[in-house]
Image (tube, rainbow, N blue to C red):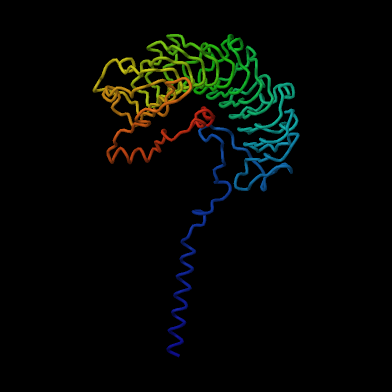
Amino acid sequence: MGFLSQLSIIHLLWAAMVFCQYEDYDFEDEYEEADHQHPYYFNPNTHAEVPRFPFPAECARECFCPPSFPLSMYCDHRKLKTIPNIPSHVQQLYLQNNDIEAVPARPFTNVTFIREINLSHNKIKFHMIDHGVFKKLSNLVQLHLQHNELEELPFPLPSSLERLLLGFNKVSRLSGNAFEGLPNITMLDLCNNFLDDSVLKGNPFSNMQNLMQLNLCNNKLQTMPPDLPSSLMYLSLENNSISYIPENYFNRLPKIIALRMSHNNLQNIPHNTFNLPNLLELNLGHNKLKQVFYIPRSLQHLYIEDNDIESINVTLMCPSIDRMNTNQLTYIRVDQNKLTIPISSYAFFCFPHIRTIYYGEQNVNVNKSTQLRTAVFRRFLTPEEYEEAEENHETHDRETEEDHEADYFHPYLQ
């Protein structure tokens, strides 16, 4: 009996311990109730009203609404020819890669909270978009319409819009009021369209006072776009036919961080054109430049490959040395020019942070490319600098020609 009594006491103690554990454990630490969950927003910094929606959430039968993202509806890659009816609670709508030709108002009848619409890679034409269909979407922040057949902008648009992507269309005209009432636009992508200088004579971008990124690459421009807003930080003008930059053009654009103008017809750059205090990246490759120009102290990456430069005058690039405010240039690409000797060693006094100079092959002879004795110059790095370079993935010297031709500012800036 003594043994059985001891066994009973041990059993009672074990049961009490287990019960106490469950009493102390708060299940809400791991599984919050639905009322306390934070709904997913495209942009958490904005304060949109939180929609009420049923569980399970409504979903068009042609689409997929994952339980883990109840505010999103995925209708992409389904060979759809029409837009399905959209439940009122949806905030993110993905309709890309279908065969949609029209955007009627009816599917958006009950839509109130939608913040992002992706209609890219379809067959939408301007005249097949119901007038004002997007205007009533008062919470819309991002609109994807790239890779369609638009000839004009689908105005009017809601004032809440921040990102508008219209690349790879057939836009050849911009109405005078195309961007009116859009005070919050920060990013506008118009690359790969049919815009020429006459389209921009009306200064369509001048009133976009919050615009930070403008992509106009792969169009038919011959002159610099006029009257850009001073808020601009990223400007993409690759693959046009621009031959000249007015001397004081960038005086009104002091915030420019990155400028890409490769694959144009630039021949001469006024000496102080790029005297910009915040410029970090400058790409002028694949032009017809014959000499270099002033390099601002902030610049880190310079691309002047495939030009007609025979020698690099470091004094033009760096007229003076300031030990208290050194130049930040770390990378220069000068391949496919007409250089016969490397850059003067004086450059390393002017640009003490240089890591790499990519010489590659030079077009000294008409029918034959030659290579300098040193195809790639790499400055010796201390262990600390090497570790920093590895962490930052500084692999510019490995970039291929195709990388540069295909690359322009990504619409999703971090």
Q: Quadrant of the N terminus?
A: bottom left
Q: Above or below — where is 7 with respect to 196? A: below
Q: Residue at x 42, y 14 (%)?
A: 290
Residue 16 versus residue 410: which sits nearer the camera? 410
Q: Residue at x 47, y 11 (%)?
A: 245
Residue 296 versus residue 93: which sits nearer the camera? 296
Which picture quadrant has residue 349?
A: top left
Q: Position of residue 172 (x, y in %)?
A: 65, 16
Residue furthest toward the bottom?
Answer: 1
Residue 144 versus residue 219: which sits nearer the camera? 219
Q: Where is residue 187 in the image (x, y as percent from the top left)?
A: 54, 25
Residue furthest toward the left?
Answer: 323
Q: Above or below — where is 88 with respect to 269? A: below
Q: Position of residue 143 (x, y in %)?
A: 61, 29
Q: Position of residue 83 (x, y in %)?
A: 73, 34
Q: Residue at x 28, y 27 (%)?
A: 352
Q: Residue at x 41, y 10 (%)?
A: 270
Judge from the rendering whether residue 207 lies leftward or rightward of residue 365; answer left or right.
Answer: right
Judge from the rendering whether residue 58 lies leftward or rightward of residue 34; answer left or right.
Answer: right
Which picture quadrant has residue 382?
A: top left
Labels in figure, total:
0
